[in-house]
Amino acid sequence: MRRFAPNRRTRGFAVFWVVVTIPMIAMTIAALSRLLIFDAKRTQQIAAQAQLRQMLLAATVSVTASGQLKPDGKIELDPQSLLATDLINQGGAMQLKIETSDANRVRISINATLGKYKANQTLIFQKRQDRFMLVESKLND
């Protein structure tokens, strides 16, 4: 029975094949890992922006629905009380800034922060009868 013995030419082709394919596989893995890292960062940014919008919405609802805005234009609301503990642990914070232009119009700026991400919203209230009504809400970029 005759055995097949690889000659020098066959072994050279196998080595060449390995030398060519291993760097190609390494480049493919590196490119995929870069894409995955970029996608993970983008997903984190989108989630943080959605959370910021939820924080702004909670502050808006709290100011308008619960009657926190008093007839004299003052507000009795601690914005930090609206945040869950896990948001505070992630660096979440909210601030309200009240500007009264006159006795019938109040402008409230709500600033929300979550880690390195920030968002703010402006609410305009107009006095109608004995209470303030929300007439404009603008999300600022």
Image (cartoon, grey):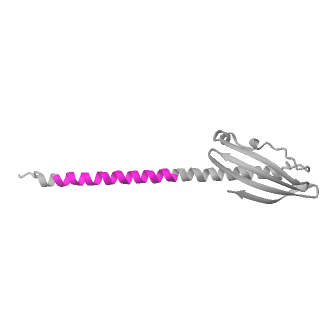
Given the current orientation, which residue lies at the most extreme right position?
Answer: 129
* Residue 33 percent location from the top left of the image: 43, 50
Question: Which quadrant of the structure image shows residue 92?
Answer: top right
Does the segment drawn in magenta span residue 132?
A: no
Given the current orientation, which residue lies at the most extreme left position?
Answer: 1
Tell me which segment is drawn in magenta. Answer: 12-39
Q: Is residue 64 left or right of residue 140?
A: right
Given the current orientation, which residue lies at the most extreme bottom position?
Answer: 135
* Residue 74 percent location from the top left of the image: 87, 47
Q: Is residue 62 left or right of residue 46?
A: right
Residue plotted at (63% across, 44% down): 115
Q: Is residue 19 left or right of residue 138?
A: left
Residue plotted at (84% across, 49% down): 66
Does the segment drawn in magenta span residue 33?
A: yes
In the picture, the quarter occupied by the C terminus is: bottom right
Magenta region, main secondary structure = helix
- Nearest the eye: 19 or 11: 19
Residue plotted at (48% across, 50% down): 37
* Residue 49 percent location from the top left of the image: 64, 52
